[in-house]
Image: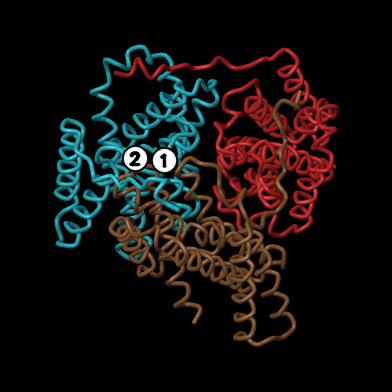
Chain colours: A cyan, B red, C brown
Amino acid sequence: MLTSVYMIAITAEAMSGALAAGRRNMDLFGVVVIAFFTALGGGTVRDILLGNFPVTWTQHPQYIYMTITGGLATIVIARFMRRLHQLFLVLDAIGLVAFTVIGCNVALGLGYDTVVVVMAGITTGIFGGIIRDLLCNRTPQVLRHELYASVSLVVALLYLELLDRGASENITLLAAFSVGLLLRMAAIRWKLSLPVFSYSKARWS
Amino acid sequence: MLTSVYMIAITAEAMSGALAAGRRNMDLFGVVVIAFFTALGGGTVRDILLGNFPVTWTQHPQYIYMTITGGLATIVIARFMRRLHQLFLVLDAIGLVAFTVIGCNVALGLGYDTVVVVMAGITTGIFGGIIRDLLCNRTPQVLRHELYASVSLVVALLYLELLDRGASENITLLAAFSVGLLLRMAAIRWKLSLPVFSYSKARWS
Amino acid sequence: MLTSVYMIAITAEAMSGALAAGRRNMDLFGVVVIAFFTALGGGTVRDILLGNFPVTWTQHPQYIYMTITGGLATIVIARFMRRLHQLFLVLDAIGLVAFTVIGCNVALGLGYDTVVVVMAGITTGIFGGIIRDLLCNRTPQVLRHELYASVSLVVALLYLELLDRGASENITLLAAFSVGLLLRMAAIRWKLSLPVFSYSKARWS
């Protein structure tokens, strides 16, 4: 189940990357590169930080082809994107939860400390978007906007807590996806966000 | 042969990095750092993604010294750069092909899947320039401009195809460099580029 | 001794990261992420470049908690930061020297060539600040401003020279910290800087 959700998720993330590349007027190659890193960059950073070699996607060429296809398809269907916006936000939220859970599982399998497991989940969930924004030369959106990284944190904590209490894999996944999707949808609907820290340059000597 | 071409290539890339640093008014240290990453950053990212430790340049201090020398020399000869522009573009194109071929070879030696081998070649070819642009806070040029990353892709595919057909190393290298250089020179001369994907923010609700 | 200095150093660096995040109006999560990378990003990049897995902080959860605490505490005490500016610059200088020495030690322990050892020291010293600036979408300050990376270079060279001559660990550390702090304080006081390389775009082509 998680694998097919993951397939949908990387395609959705690849499309989000392609749109960001389109806003920077990138060429086809740039679109594919950004699509790839948005979809698989989070897992790549996680694998490198955890020393988990070979990096996952190098062993699954189909993931690579899916991000390339997703990126190129976006160019074709970009004109309909406005109408698909709602669907897109749902797919992106599904991706966030799936990536987080998968990231936690990888770190758990390697025997890392709980706090590192949580960080591996969040890294997998949000770092693709951070790399996308770095390559598009803008301040990472996930560090500024309505609840996104926080959803990943809640999902990771909930997932580990349920596993720890011996809940079955199915129950745990169901809970993680339900809570994660509801929280993310609520954040979008009511523009929920964490408090912002504004520190003006002028105040620093 | 490939090694001496590689030496020329990293020096040329280091110089390109130093010029970009100069446009950002960096100090001597910043010039050297950017020169280093422009020249050796592509291979570094490739080695990390492939789990190929120790990273190549850590075992070849002479590469490090060459990038430092190239960076500092650029400051001295910057005033002549305008006149050397043509030569510089040729050296950069040689570097692109050499880096691509070397990157493919590293991934081949580690037994990776063909699509990963191609990506390793392209990564080695273009990622130095991407890191240079990130450190100089501008949108990576290779993802936007006239054929550059695409040349790396064509070279990688051609190289692997010829190897696969049992062509000798010399023939294969000759073909890769001929096609790569011609394509890159043609791209510069006639401003060939891939189609650009422009996606206006306004259209996204 | 070095460990307790290191604790102070990562807290100070985390605070510097939090302030930079505040200038970009990031939310609480963004502040913590930037604080973490500013404090531990240099060591992370060093460990990855040296193939030193598992990455140090994954084995020391207390370092992670300290950067989170430092980041959040900064939000609370931000209003007093102006008054603490002097203290802050001293702590940052201590951090620069401590990170440099620790980075050299890690590379020495892995048997790398001297030039790589020096680079590992400098990487540990300055890369946290570079990642902070990348995530905040500004040109890395350490590559442009008054002596900072150069102090790290001098400290690394002095440290290795003294070790090489058989000086005791205590003497070596004392010398590294004295010279490093004095140099950095002098650089701030008299705005010492390396020559800047300015290369105008207009002159190219």
Residue located 35% across and 70% down the image: C62
Mark 1 nearby-residue class (10 Å; few <14, some 14–19, many ≥20): many
Q: Which mark is residue A130?
A: 1
- Please state if C151 lies on the left or on the right of C83 as rendered: right
Mark 2 or mark 1: name the one nearer the start of the chain.
1
Report if the CB atoms under discs 2 and 1 are less than 8 Å apart: yes
Percent coordinates x, y for residue B93 in the rendering: 75, 30
In this rendering, the answer to whether B204 lies above or below A13 is above
Percent coordinates x, y for residue B177 in the rendering: 78, 29
Q: Chain of mark 2?
A: A
Residue C69 seen by the camera: yes
**Residue behind mark 2:** A142
**Amino acid at dot 1:** Ile
Q: Which part of the image, by quadrant, shows the C terminus of chain C? A: top right
Residue located 38% across and 19% down the image: B201
Total number of numbered discs in the rendering? 2
Q: Chain of mark 1?
A: A
Residue located 70% across and 69% down the image: C157
Percent coordinates x, y for residue B81 in the rendering: 81, 32
Residue located 17% across and 50% down the image: A172
**Amino acid at dot 2:** Val
- Please state if C199 lies on the left or on the right of B194 as rendered: right
Which secondary structure, mark 2?
helix
Which secondary structure, mark 1?
helix
